[in-house]
Image (cartoon, rainbow, N blue to C red):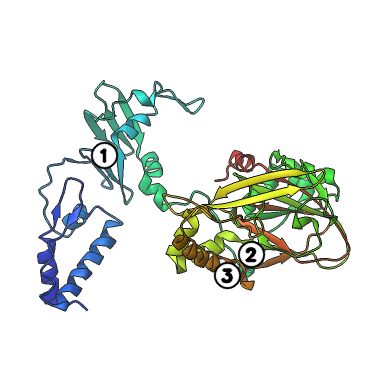
Amino acid sequence: MINANEYIYIWQLVKKLKFTEVYDCQLEVPDPSRSTRAQQVTMTLMRLLTRLSGYMHWKQGLESLGGSSQSKRLQHTAAHSSSCNYQLLPDCLELSYGGLVMHFDYVWLRDHCRSASCYNSKTNQRNLDTASIDLNIRPSKSRVDENNLFLTWPDGHITRYSLTWLAQNSYEGQKRSAVHPRILWSADIYSSARVPSASWDKFMSCDEELKNFLNNFLLYGIAFVEGVPPTLEATETATQRVSLIRETMYGRVWNFTSDFSRGDTAYTKLALDRHTDTSYFQEPCGIQVFHCLRHEGTGGRTLLVDGFHAADAVLRRSPQSFELLSRVPIKHEYVENLSEHRNHMIGIGPVLNVYPWNNEVYMIRYNNYDRSVINTVPHDVVRRWYGAHRQLSAELRSPDNELWVKLKPGKVLFIDNWRVLHGRESFTGLRQLCGCYLTRDDVLNTARSLGLQA
């Protein structure tokens, strides 16, 4: 605990804070040899300031505590809204709105003018030539009202920005928000959610049924359509309701049994460990569709694992391992040398692909069958990568995360191949599957056109 005398000592340290032009904090820390207790109090102060910086500017935070500032910058406050104020700093505009402190580069602000001369609102395309903007540009005038910020540029052009739009499109705002809303799941979480399957008839005729199906798919990475006629043609019709089919070297819509007609373990009766497909593509296929047309035997259940749930567990328990898996490029390779099929595919990328501004995973590339020689990083990094890969594999292989489903005629499964790993148990007898890959962009396009965030 910090006692009253030590709070006085902390306040004395606060008064020694100096702010540079870019608001870097420089603390004149007393001689560490004074006492261990002094070091503890100093560290307490630094932790408090670090927490404070996540919600408001350090200088503003100190002012709210009663400190004074000799800043030469002008602060502007909206006449009708005490929650908005801004400053024109030498290199950017600082805006405080809705509890968020944001910084906007002046070139960025000029480039994102949405006036009729700079932006075509009918086509949602930019008219302004970005390369013509002075890189040292700075507004000559500024004002703010309850909902908008107005900037006047040196040539007299006036730009109006919605404060809400600025908050939504700021780096600080994007850093705090998810690009793709989702629900991470284990087997129990998914089973307890009782996610409904779409009905074939309604799915094909009702946009609301399609919207609900896509909403479930976006949230969980898997979705089912029940009651589909057990034919290749009906399966193809169902997939085209969602997206365009992505034709690959396996064809447009494939229909196969365990005849080993292709040089791939999938064309056998053997069990398949969890994996994502086409990891050897530079851009792996986005969505995979499965429909079991018939099975005259035993076994063959399908295994589904939420890769994002496993990645999140690694991030929480070992951030260093998560970073390795998201930065080290790994090569995957597929070589097929059969009389009728000759292919050599190579895809390179990290196991975890993340958005750099918020560390949100958007794709997992995990396939131990097709992972090629690791030769893109030095040996000391390789050893640490193996450790990180082991942690991720342990999460993916945890029985708690394994969702087993039995595919049957009439039940079509859609899988987000960038998120959910699939596998199967071994089986006996004749088992006929059909399916295809869908173009990811078109699936998301369909979802957005129905009003979903995707």
Residue that appears at 75% across and 54% down: 264
Q: Which mark is residue 93?
A: 1
Chain-order first, disc 3 or disc 1: 1
Q: Residues within 10 Å of mark 3 (few under 14, many from 20)?
A: few
Choose top left, top right, bottom left or bottom right for residue 197: bottom right
Q: Are the residues tagged 2 and 1 within 8 Å (C-beta)?
A: no
Measure the alpha-carbon separation of dots 3 and 1: 47 Å
> As rendered, which of 131 and 281 lies closer to the eye?
281
Q: Residues within 10 Å of mark 2 (few under 14, many from 20)?
A: some
Q: Is 42 above or below relative to 221?
A: below
Q: Position of residue 222 (x, y in %)?
A: 66, 55
> As rendered, which of 137 and 117 lies closer to the eye?
137
The residue labelled by disc 3 is 394
Q: Residue 190 carries which label?
A: 2
Residue that appears at 12% across and 51% down: 69
Task: Kindly identify the amino acid type of the residue bearing the numbered disc 1.
Answer: Leu
- Marks 3, 1: nearer the viewer: 3
Q: For the residue labelled by badge 1, is the local secondary structure a helix, a strand or a loop? A: strand
Task: Kindly identify the amino acid type of the residue bearing the numbered disc 3.
Answer: Ala
Quarter placement of the N terminus? bottom left
